[in-house]
Image (cartoon, helix red, strand yellow):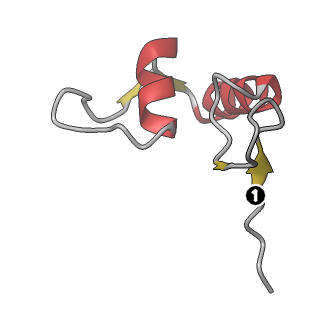
């Protein structure tokens, strides 16, 4: 069973596959913030966005528990 969804960019002439990111999908932002609150994880919005987009590198520290 394939659970991956392909998101289409309808504004372009040719359709392109896009992965959903917190910046493009407001539902992901709210659900992720609720999850962080439930887990008592303290991250600022910028760090959370980088982490969820897979841009985590040496500059992003591990989670700080509140």
Front residue of 14/34: it is 14
Image point (60%, 35%), residue name: 39
Image point (61%, 30%), residue name: 36
Residue 32 point in image, percent of width and height: 68, 32
Residue 13 point in image, percent of width and height: 76, 38
Q: Is residue 44 visible?
A: no
Residue 38 point in image, percent of width and height: 68, 32
Image point (63%, 35%), residue name: 21
Residue 24 drawn above or below residue 8:
above
Q: How many marks?
A: 1
Front residue of 60/53: it is 53
Location of residue 24 (image quadrant): top right
Front residue of 18/31: it is 18
Task: Say left or right for 21 vs 57.
Answer: right
Quadrant holding the C terminus: top left
Location of residue 60 (image quadrant): top left
Q: Which residue is mark 1?
A: 6
Residue 13 drawn above or below residue 29:
below
Q: Residue furthest front?
A: 13
Q: Residue furthest left?
A: 58
Q: Is residue 52 visible?
A: yes
Task: Say left or right for 58 vs 28.
Answer: left
Quadrant holding the N terminus: bottom right
């Amino acid at each position: 069973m394939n659970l991956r969804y392909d998101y289409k960019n309808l504004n372009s002439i040719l359709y392109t596959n896009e992965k959903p990111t917190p910046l493009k999908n407001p539902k992901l932002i709210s659900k992720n913030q609720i999850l962080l609150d439930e887990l008592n994880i303290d991250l600022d919005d910028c760090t959370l966005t980088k982490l969820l987009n897979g841009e985590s590198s040496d500059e992003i520290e591990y989670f700080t528990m509140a």
